[in-house]
Image (cartoon, rainbow, N blue to C red):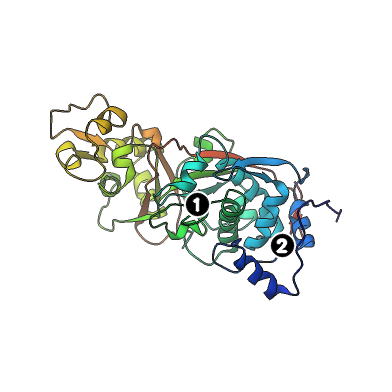
Amino acid sequence: MQTVALRSRRIEAADHFEAVELFFTRGWTDGFPIVPPTEERVEAMLQTLDRDPGEVVGIMAPRFGKATLEKIAINAVMAGCEPMFFPVVVAAIEAIADDDFNLNGVQCTTHVAAPLLIINGPVRQALEINAGANCFGQGFRANATIGRAVRLCMINIGGGLPGVTDKATFGHPGKYTYCVAENEEASPWEPLHVERGFRPEQSTVTVFAAEAPHNVNDHASQGARGILTTVADTMATMGNNNMYKRGEMAVVIGPEHAATIAAEGWSKQDVKTFLFQEARRPVRELTRSGEYYGEVTWEKYWPRWIDRNDPSALIPVVNSPEDILVFVAGGTVGRFSLIIPGWGDHGTRAVTRVIPDLGSCSDGTCHA
């Protein structure tokens, strides 16, 4: 393995445990123990990409720190990533550093938003990123450590410090790690990245400023319309930002639900159009509580075509069907789906980046 010239400051520690405690003391962790980022481990990460370790991938708010490949690699080691995971982490950092994502707002909001990473393409199998049973839960190294590496970069490079710059009232467990793959094999539709303009053979990561997943339980409906009516009802709640401030929302269709819907010939666009039309609440309900700010809400967020004087007029949860991110994930047993509200229209949009081709992988390392 070729030696990589590292530029970061060296810190000496007597052993593994002293290093872990040092990182806790200096506030460089997410609350869990870390893997000490030795030179050898950091170099192994950097070997997976033929790029200068000093290359700046993005500027990370609110500290506006420079996310160099070397700094990202250090945090990826700390998170417990294998070297072959590193290109995915880099692509995710490129995505959240994009102006369209608005990392400054996501890092500093009082809302619960956290970057959800949605992985598509061949990299899913190559790295064994879970898209099936318990895909949003524990038990899979790639999901756990890739998402954690992004969060550690947000803390250590971006300066997202809880109670200091990170003003989340509650947060949610996805702020430790929030990474999932699409179950493309169980999906009857084109995968998310293809819908967003990429080729099926490309691997991508899509980042979305998201709340925690909200379960949708529908064991009774035997057809597409019934299942999606249940999904739409779950989407249109008075407590989520989208209902008042639009923006994007994710809908994760479970494989059993997807098969039932597709069996009636429904396309993904049909699903999105139906949800846009059905996920609505009447003005009379929305104006009595929630996040209603009177004239400001009408002028800034709600559609012009809604009759303000009609209390029965229905407000859609998003501005258009295209604002609903639909993908298939989860285990093949269980008639469940998920809805994931977003941060609302706060200047954030989902961003997709291509993950470099991993090429041939051996001995735990991959070379692009």
Helix, strand or loop status at disc 1: loop
Classify residue 281 as left or right of residue 109.
left
Residue that carries the numbered disc 2 in the rendered image: 37
User: Which of the 4 quarters of the picture holds residue 141?
Assistant: bottom right
Above-or-below relation of 212 to 60: below
Where residue 315 sits in the image (x, y, percent)? 24, 35
Classify residue 343 as left or right of residue 98.
left
Q: Quadrant of the N terminus?
A: bottom right
Where residue 4 sits in the image (x, y, percent)? 83, 52
Dot in front, 1 or 2: 2
Name the residue located 38 percent from the left edge and 36 percent from the top edge.
345
* Residue nearest the observer in this picture, 327 or 305: 305
* Residue nearest the observer in this picture, 7 or 358: 7
Give the distance between the C-alpha atoms of the residues marked 1 and 2, in whole angstroms: 33 Å
Helix, strand or loop status at disc 2: loop
Where residue 187 sits in the image (x, y, percent)? 46, 47
Where residue 156 sits in the image (x, y, percent)? 61, 54
Dot 1: few (<14), some (14–19), or many (≥20) neighbours within 10 Å? Answer: many
What label does residue 41 carry, if any?
none
Residue that carries the numbered disc 1 in the rendered image: 183
Classify residue 34 as left or right of residue 360.
left
Dot 2: few (<14), some (14–19), or many (≥20) neighbours within 10 Å? Answer: some
Residue ranking furthest to the right: 2
**First in sequence: mark 1 or mark 2?**
2
- Residue 56 in view in this figure: yes
- Residue 201 in view in this figure: no
Residue ranking furthest to the top: 305
Name the residue located 24 percent from the left edge and 37 percent from the top edge.
293
For the residue marked with disc 1, what is the amino acid? Asn
For the residue marked with disc 2, what is the amino acid? Pro
Above-or-below relation of 355 to 171: above
Above-or-below relation of 157 to 296: below
